[in-house]
């Protein structure tokens, strides 16, 4: 029994040793498997790191390539911008030169026009002065002629006899001087009455002992008339009135024919540029007229005082703007321009 027991114990011991060995082998195999897995993991990690490194290098390369391409593009844009800026600068310089030439040409034209205007103004002033002087000489000549005629008329009115004084003779005329009507400037009441011719069989001469000298007849030629000339007269009048609403003074159509009648122009079209502007105590009216007169325009302008003194102008303004009361003319001024007959619109 002990031997059997020992044999069983030995068998049990052998089984335990076999199991221990098997466990040890399994443990060794597991350790080797773990080591292999660990190595595999390390290799995988290294591979992953290598892939990441290569990916990073690739990304860096792509980034460098993109940055280089961007730099090249920006450089190309910069070069193009520089070329465009240079081209625009040349274009601006060219335009500036052309503008400077144009301004210089315009300045020369303006200088030429200014000089021409000054010459024209100077010539116009000389013509006006010559015309004014001609009118003054004409007035003086007419005054002298009137004075001479008046003296001649007074001498003729005095009683004369054949023994006392010789018969008066008319003053000799200058060369190219037209005869003047001796009674043209004498008022009607002051002219001597004409004597009727006595009949042929009148015996009054025989009673007086001799015939009286016959009175001289008047010269029939009239004084030459001055030619009519066209002028533009521009009036600017300040009107004082309480009726100065914009709606009242804006409509000037009804005023035009009234002004044409007042100044006796050829037609309504000869009244032009009627403008009104409201002021504090009234309004200002500007208008122009075209007139044909033998008077000097400055003398014609002075006749505007007569139109304001007799109220004709105020009545025209009242009727033209349909005012309830006659307005008051406060201040007025005027100027004139001579119209070239060749440029006169028909």
Image: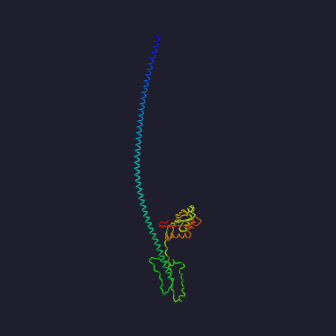
- x and y percentages locating residue 176 in the rendered image: 45, 76
Instruction: Tell how many labels.
Output: 0
Q: Quadrant of residue 49 in the image?
A: top left
- x and y percentages locating residue 87 in the rendered image: 40, 50
Q: Quadrant of residue 56 in the image?
A: top left
Look at the image and name its color scheme: rainbow
- x and y percentages locating residue 279 in the rendered image: 54, 63
Q: Is residue 183 above or below residue 297?
A: below
Which of 18 and 324 lies nearest the eye of the viewer? 18
Q: Is residue 99 above or below residue 119?
A: above
- Left or right, 72 with respect to 247, comes to left
In the orientation shown, which residue stands out farthest toward the right? 324
In the orientation shown, which residue stands out farthest toward the top? 1
In the orientation shown, which residue stands out farthest toward the front? 2
Q: Is residue 217 above or below residue 50?
A: below
- x and y percentages locating residue 210 in the rendered image: 51, 88
């Amino acid at each position: 029994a002990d031997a059997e027991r020992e044999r069983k114990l030995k068998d049990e011991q052998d089984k335990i040793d076999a199991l221990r060995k098997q466990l040890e082998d399994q443990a060794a195999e597991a350790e080797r498997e773990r080591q292999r897995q660990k190595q595999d993991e390390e290799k995988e990690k290294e591979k992953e790191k290598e892939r990441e490194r290569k990916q990073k290098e690739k990304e860096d390369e792509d980034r460098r390539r993109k940055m280089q391409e961007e730099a090249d593009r920006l450089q190309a844009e910069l070069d193009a911008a520089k070329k465009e800026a240079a081209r625009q600068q040349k274009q601006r310089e060219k335009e500036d030169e052309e503008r400077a030439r144009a301004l210089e040409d315009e300045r020369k034209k303006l200088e030429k026009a200014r000089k021409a205007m000054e010459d024209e103004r100077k010539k116009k002033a000389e013509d006006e002065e010559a015309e004014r002087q001609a009118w003054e000489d004409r007035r003086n000549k007419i005054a002298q002629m009137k004075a001479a005629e008046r003296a001649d008329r007074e001498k003729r009115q005095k009683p004369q006899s054949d023994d006392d004084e010789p018969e008066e003779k008319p003053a000799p005329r200058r060369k190219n001087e037209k005869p003047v009507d001796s009674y043209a400037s004498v008022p009607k009441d002051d002219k001597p009455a004409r004597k009727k011719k006595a009949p042929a069989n009148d015996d009054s001469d025989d009673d007086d002992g001799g015939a009286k000298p016959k009175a001289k007849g008047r010269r029939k030629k009239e004084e030459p008339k001055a030619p009519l000339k066209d002028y533009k007269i521009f009036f600017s009048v300040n009107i004082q009135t309480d009726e100065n609403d914009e709606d009242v003074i804006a409509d000037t159509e009804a005023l035009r024919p009234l002004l044409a009648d007042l100044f006796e122009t050829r037609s309504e079209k000869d009244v032009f540029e009627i403008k009104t502007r409201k002021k504090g105590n009234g309004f200002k009216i500007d208008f122009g007229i075209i007139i044909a007169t033998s008077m000097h325009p400055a003398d014609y302008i002075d006749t505007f005082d007569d139109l304001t003194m007799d109220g004709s102008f105020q009545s025209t303004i009242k009727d033209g703007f349909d005012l309830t009361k006659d307005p008051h003319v406060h201040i007025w001024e005027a100027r004139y321009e001579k119209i070239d007959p060749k440029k006169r619109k028909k």
